Image (tube, rainbow, N blue to C red):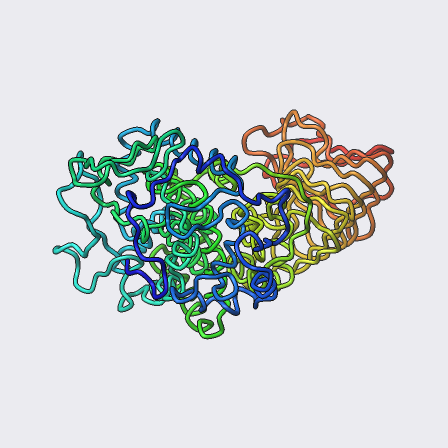
Amino acid sequence: MPSPAGHHSPVSVTERAMKRRGFLKTSLGASAGVLAAPTFASWLGAADAKAATAAAAFVDDYKSNVVANLTPETNAVVRALGGMAEVWKTGAAWNTGTPLRPEVLRANMRYCARITSARTEAQAKEAFVYDRQHQSYAMIAALGPLADLYKSGAKAVTSITSAPDTTPATTISDAVPADAPAGSALGAGSYDSALGQVAKLVDTVRGPYASGNPGKFAFQYPRPWRMNEDSEVVDTGAKDALGYPVYDSEVVVVTQLLRQRSTNGAEDGGFPSGHTNAFHLAGLAFAYAVPERFQELVTRAFELSHTRIMSGMHSTVDVLGGRIMATALAAAALADSANADLKAAARAQALAYFQAQTGTTADTLFAYAHSDADDQYADRDDNAQAVKPRLTYVLNRDGGNEPLTVPKGAEVLLETRLPYLDAAQRREVLRTTALPSGYVLLDGFEQWGRLNLFAAADGYGAFDSGVTVTLDAAAGGFGAADSWRNDIDGRGSLTKQGTGTLTLTGHNRYTGGTVLKDGVLAAGSAHALGHGDVRVSGGTLRVATKSSVQIHGTYAQESSALEVTLRSGRGPALEVTRRAVLGAGSVLSLRLDADKPPAAGSTVRVLGAAGLRGQFDRVELNSDTLRAVPVYTAEGLSVRLLKR
């Protein structure tokens, strides 16, 4: 890549020899703690630091990310990545920087050395493919059962489908295959296709202000294969078989990628990782258009980014930096009013196309998109376990309990995934699912690195005040039915309104109580309803568990239904620690469990309580062979199953 105007001229390794041991163990002006937002005093003068702190919000200033702007006060991306300034002091050249937190950078290099030394040949070849393949195309696989339909509809192609066994004779670039259908395009696909608006949205999010080059030039942090903990990074004149200088590095670059490396360290910085930035940008653009695969796209972006470390081409801090900038840049592009029509058109086009291709509706497309048992992202828990350690990698939390002020515009990232929430509610979701403060690098300006989009797709992490959610059965998709899987904490309450369905599956501890006014509220775990009173004044409370659902408070029901599946061997479907009150219009709707139905003649416990007042107006059993006779006591309700 070209050297920007005013940037330091390339300096050879011989001219700027640097001992790696000293590089990692020297600390100049290291901070004693981590701040909620970076103090750039270790990088800038006091006046410049003040200017950076008072700068415009990222989403309002993202177009400042060009190579002419290389300081925090002039470039929004450099500013957002300011947490790196707490770790690394940029030098006059690419190999003269100084660590401010040597323990972080030492852990960074050791992780890279360990993972590159232990990788398999299959992992090496995979890393080559994702190094050379167009990053937007690589993200398409996260669409699972929809992936091949997308490639066909978007005319998206690649020429990089496998890796050679050895180092290629030349550099390799992705290209449209000669036998590709007419109009085919690399990356997200052709604008002149059935999914042209989606392809255009991906390219727009990855637009001219989304480059990682200004950040690379500003920080000048070397790639890991140019550094080694216990040896000098010097050019002794020795060359490898490809003519590259020999560095005695513990980080082992994938054999197939040796020729793909740059020889110019001054113009080939490691931080932030450009591939990581591109993977996450494409992933979040696709997630906006196809939110049915939101978490899977986020997971794949993390997975592909990890191959940058596995390949030896980047380090953990590089990858963290790439994710941080991509999160901010994606939000900025999607929040930009100039792109409002495009993002709406992309979402509408994707929805219409996939429904037509699969014969689904807005309500059933999600199920189809998760119907393939061979889908590599089929298991949500596996995805969560893959993402979690990569949110922080080698970073240790250094204390601090600073509350997060969600960056301006970040809520747009959840606009299609949580369409039934307003902007303020989506901001609360981001805030209550975010990482805690205290992770250096993530605590940069506006703290974009603390956002956890995988968790945010599963709804609130806490109710810190009263939360009212309205889902509409006629809206279709997530607007009609959704599941919140997080363990919800907080002192606030939940009120469910609207004709749609909300399912809670977490181990919830919120204490403000639960109110159901309309539609369906499904308790998908034993502690789904939190710690507090539960009032059902309309709609249907559905017990959707194999174990008893606990109500840690009182239970009141009127003009509504309690829907229970009768299962042999289970305790009460609903276990109330205090009193249960059944008012006028209360209905009990029963069905038999498909796997363990209770037999005729058995008595099944439905409701247990410290005390019961009132009765159901009607008890219904959905069975052609059995009928249910209610048996009330002071401590609850059972039903006796008799043959019809």
Residue that appears at 49% across and 42% down: 99
Q: Is residue 368 visible?
A: no
Q: Which of the 4 quarters of the picture holds residue 2? A: bottom left
Nearest to the observer: residue 566 or residue 155: 155
- Taking 398 as reference, is 148 left or right? left
Residue 124, placed above or below residue 176: above
Between 566 and 404, the one nearer to me in the picture: 404
Residue 404 pos. (x, y %):
65, 53
- Quadrant where the image shows the C terminus: top right
Q: How many marks?
A: 0
Q: Quadrant of the N terminus?
A: bottom left
**Where in the figure is residue 626, as x and y percent of width and height?**
63, 34
* Residue 177 visible, this orientation: yes
431 vs 126, left or right, is right
Nearer to us in this view, 83 or 240: 240
Q: Quadrant of residue 200?
A: bottom left
Which residue is outermost to the front?
Answer: 15
Determine the residue positioned at 58% across, 55% down. 41
In the rendered structure, the answer to whether residue 610 lies left or right of residue 523 reads right
Which of the 4 image quadrants contains residue 209?
bottom left
Along the viewing direction, whichever of 547 and 7 lies nearer the viewer: 7
**Along the horizontal axis of the image, is 586 left or right of 3?**
right
What percent of the width, then of the height, locates residue 350? Answer: 39, 62
Give the percent coordinates (x, y) of residue 92: 41, 53
The relative height of residue 150 versus residue 108 in the rendered view (above or below) is below
